[in-house]
Image (cartoon, grey):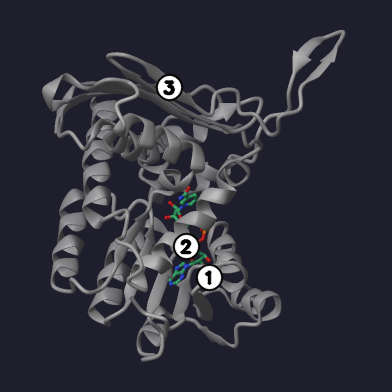
């Protein structure tokens, strides 16, 4: 275990990168954000002005060359994750990479092989939901046998409709709705069911609002069924068009009990009653839902780098999520079941 403060550099200061940067700069015990990189000058200005980071670079290579940087947090576009993760490991850095590691299974496996050559470096993928206190409680209950044998997971990631269709602009590189959104549900299902091997998937979907997705073979509402070895099953739903807010929910069904996480998209515990009925305010987006989890995730990465506890997530978790996500995407595009 190290008592040294971990020097961290961050790559990518976009929608999520800024959040991770704020977390690391202000609120992550044992770590210090010392450098940032982005090809966008305005983002580096933000890091300088908002966070007081004076080591700002326009390329990852410059951060990797700095011997005093211990760990890199990658919050860059998905298409860059795999190569950048390998580059960080080869430079002797610990690395946290946002999900998904790659849209391609062979590429994930190649990064795993690089990680195996650097066993003393932490390589962790950002499946943030595992750090949400409610999901952690559910997993602990399952491990203690509260549901008997869990055999079915029903999980959804449903975003509030964004009329600007911002995700349509990223449709070419996001990998589609299942790789972008359901990859979290896929990871949760594997985790809750004890990492069974997926054997076959079926998927379907529809475009309810965002016609701009059609040229990319993508949908704004998608459904998938995954069969696992041994009879366990998972059902996923992903949507970009919810009218009320962000609703991530998961149900786990076992032989002696069931549990549900996140039903109702509650923003708070306040309930309102008036002539129109009874209701509550809804979560607007995933930041509102998973703020605590993003903090705890970064704390877990830093603790693993400092040797305080093992990394709770491996690159193999990322590979297996991509394997299932890609099979689902292929099933959506072909209309046929796909063997994993
Ligand atoms: P974004 O497009 O807002 O940000 C990407 C950032 O990467 C920008 O700052 C851009 O300037 C920077 N960048 C581009 N090329 C670069 C390079 N060569 N080197 C360094 N920086 C570079 O994207 P967003 O929404 O922040 O997503 C980033 C990643 O995080 C994606 O892979 C996405 O899948 C993942 N993500 C994960 C979420 C989760 O729930 N865990 C939620 C949202 C995004």
Q: Position of residue 10 (x, y in %)?
A: 47, 73
Quadrant for residue 66, please give it. Answer: bottom left
Cα separation, mark 1 vs mark 3, equals: 33 Å
Q: Which residue is at the far right?
A: 275
Please name whichever residue, 94 or 148, is drawn nearer the observer in this view of the structure: 148
Q: Is residue 259 left or right of residue 81?
A: right
Q: Position of residue 85 (x, y in %)?
A: 30, 68
Q: Does residue 27 lie above or below 205 as drawn?
A: below
Tag of residue 116: none
Count of marks, rendered view: 3
Q: Which residue is at the far front?
A: 144
Q: Does residue 310 lie above or below 89 as drawn?
A: above
- For disc 1, the marked residue is 29
- For disc 2, the marked residue is 299
Q: Position of residue 158 (x, y in %)?
A: 52, 30
Q: Earlier in the sequence, mark 2 or mark 1?
A: 1
Q: Is residue 258 left or right of residue 332?
A: right
Cα separation, mark 2 vs mark 1, equals: 7 Å
Cα separation, mark 2 vs mark 3, equals: 27 Å
Q: Is residue 148 left or right of residue 231?
A: right
Please name whichever residue, 97 or 14, is drawn nearer the observer in this view of the structure: 97
Q: Does residue 224 lie above or below 11 as drawn?
A: above
Please name whichever residue, 46 or 251, is drawn nearer the observer in this view of the structure: 251
- For disc 3, the marked residue is 259
SS at mark 1? loop
Q: Position of residue 249 (x, y in %)?
A: 49, 28
Quadrant for residue 145, please give it. Answer: top left
Quadrant containing the N terminus in the rendered view = bottom left
Q: Few, some or many C-alpha atoms within 10 Å of disc 3 (few <14, some 14-19, many ≥20)?
A: some
Q: Earlier in the sequence, mark 2 or mark 3?
A: 3
């Amino acid at each position: 275990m190290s008592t040294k403060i971990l020097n961290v550099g961050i790559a990518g200061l976009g929608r999520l990168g800024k959040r991770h940067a704020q977390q690391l700069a202000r609120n992550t015990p044992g770590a210090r954000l010392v450098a940032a990189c982005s090809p966008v000058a305005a983002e580096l200005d933000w890091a300088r002005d908002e966070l007081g980071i004076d080591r700002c670079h326009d390329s990852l290579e410059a951060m990797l060359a700095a011997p005093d940087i211990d760990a890199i947090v990658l919050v860059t576009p998905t298409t860059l994750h795999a190569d950048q993760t390998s580059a960080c490991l080869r430079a002797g850095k610990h690395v946290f990479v946002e999900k998904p590691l790659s849209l391609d299974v062979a590429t994930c496996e190649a990064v795993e092989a690089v990680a195996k050559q650097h066993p003393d470096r932490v390589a962790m993928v950002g499946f943030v939901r595992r750090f949400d206190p409610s999901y952690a409680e559910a997993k602990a209950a399952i491990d203690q046998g509260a549901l008997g044998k869990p055999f079915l997971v029903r999980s959804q990631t449903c975003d509030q409709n964004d009329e600007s269709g911002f995700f349509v602009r990223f449709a070419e590189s996001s990998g589609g709705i299942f790789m972008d959104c359901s990859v979290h549900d896929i990871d949760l299902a594997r985790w809750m069911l004890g990492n069974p091997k997926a054997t076959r998937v079926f998927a379907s979907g529809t475009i309810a609002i965002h016609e701009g997705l059609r040229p990319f073979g993508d949908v704004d509402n998608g459904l998938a069924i995954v069969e696992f070895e041994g009879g366990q099953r998972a059902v996923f739903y992903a949507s970009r068009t919810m009218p009320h807010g962000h609703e991530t929910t998961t149900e786990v069904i076992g032989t002696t009990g069931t549990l549900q996480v996140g039903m109702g998209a509650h923003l708070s515990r306040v309930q309102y009653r008036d002539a129109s009925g009874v209701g509550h305010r809804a979560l607007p987006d995933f930041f509102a839902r998973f703020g605590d989890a993003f903090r705890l995730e970064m704390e877990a990465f830093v603790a693993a780098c400092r040797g305080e506890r093992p990394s709770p997530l491996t690159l193999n978790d990322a590979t297996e999520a991509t394997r299932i996500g890609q099979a689902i995407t292929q099933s959506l595009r072909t209309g046929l079941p796909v063997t994993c």
